[in-house]
Amino acid sequence: MSDILVHTEAGITTISFNRLERKNSITSTMYASMADALEQASADASVRVVVFQGHETVFSAGNDIGDFLNAPPSTPESPVFRFLRGIATFPKPVLAAVCGPAVGIGTTLLFHCDLVYAGDNAAFSMPFVNLGLCPEAASSLLVPQMFGYHRAAEALLLGEPFMAEAALEVGLVNRVLPPTEVNGYAQAQARKLAAKPVTALIETKRLMKKGQASQVQAQMAEEGASFGRMLREPAAREAFAAFMEKRKPDFTKA
Ligand code: COA
């Protein structure tokens, strides 16, 4: 079984994280599969909507930390950056169904979705600083915009998790549901969108996003350059080693 499942039916492409034993953490192979799936969904006129979903207990634990240690992304063409550009510029509606932990990119990818449905067990976090890193996916721009600066600082500087109700309050989430109902509800909403005229959906999304499309791209590129450099620096190396060794990191020298 693949770690990313892609299924297209009735105009809806569903991309599912399928690596439960590693809490749906994402490897470079998985980013490449998701980037390919988005490219195909964009080019295929019969696809009208994309849905990202995880498991009832976990959406995604973010980037695979072993991958960060052994094969950090090195160029803008690395799969993670290809995926991020793909989702940020995807022309048709993108939905997400999120239950349980959504860590790092598991949360930041949601800023590029049009509709987000969450289980009442959803726990969002962007612990980049705790890993010696900086934000990615233009989250350093989009989180302050959506949350307000001080709440963004809490999420991005302290890296503390926040639950579904708080995500609903700041506008990251459209609706909170029991975890068993989230994937089904997202599919029902996707079916509503898939029945609408696709040209009108695409043009409406383009108009809503165009005001800051180039700013998002520029922020993502700048973050990506910093992120790529910081992955190789002592603070991040210590954080990843500590995670693998199941101990607290020691940042006294970082
Ligand atoms: N990369 C690699 N492996 C990961 C992982 C990740 N991001 N997240 C979890 N795993 C592994 C764990 O090491 C563990 O492996 P083991 O069974 O060999 O010990 C397994 O998945 C289960 O994870 P565990 O931590 O025991 O599950 P949990 O339910 O107690 O906690 C999380 C779930 C998501 C809260 C926790 O795993 C976590 O915080 N993960 C790291 C998140 C992170 O920092 N991601 C990077 C963001 S940039």
Image: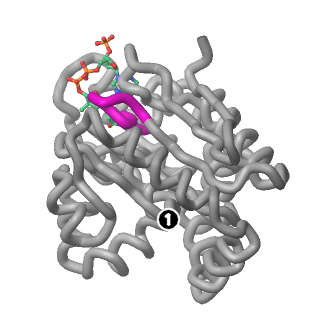
Question: Seen in the image, is 60 located left or right of residue 75?
Answer: left
Q: Quadrant of the N terminus?
A: top right
Residue placed most toward the observer, 252 or 120: 120
Q: Which residue is located at x 64 percent, y 50 percent?
A: 81
Q: Which residue is located at x 25 percent, y 37 percent?
A: 179
Where ligand 1 lies, by quadrant? Answer: top left
Residue 160 visible here: no
Residue placed most toward the observer, 105 or 65: 105
Relative to residue 53, is residue 163 depicted above or below?
below
Residue placed most toward the observer, 16 or 241: 16
Residue lying farthest bottom?
A: 211
- Residue extent of the magenta highlight: 54-62
Question: Seen in the image, is 19 located left or right of residue 163?
Answer: right
Q: How is the image coloured?
A: one colour
Q: Where is residue 47 in the image (x, y as percent from the top left)?
A: 74, 50
Q: Position of residue 28 (x, y in %)?
A: 62, 32
What secondary structure predominates along the stretch shown in magenta?
A: loop
Tag 1, which secondary structure? loop
The amino acid beneath tag 1 is Asp
Relative to residue 96, is residue 73 depicted above or below?
above
Question: Seen in the image, is 65 located left or right of residue 126?
Answer: right
Q: Which residue is located at x 68 percent, y 33 percent?
A: 33
The verdict on residue 58 being magenta is yes
Relative to residue 4, is residue 172 depicted above or below?
below
Residue at numbered disc 1: 114
The verdict on residue 235 being magenta is no
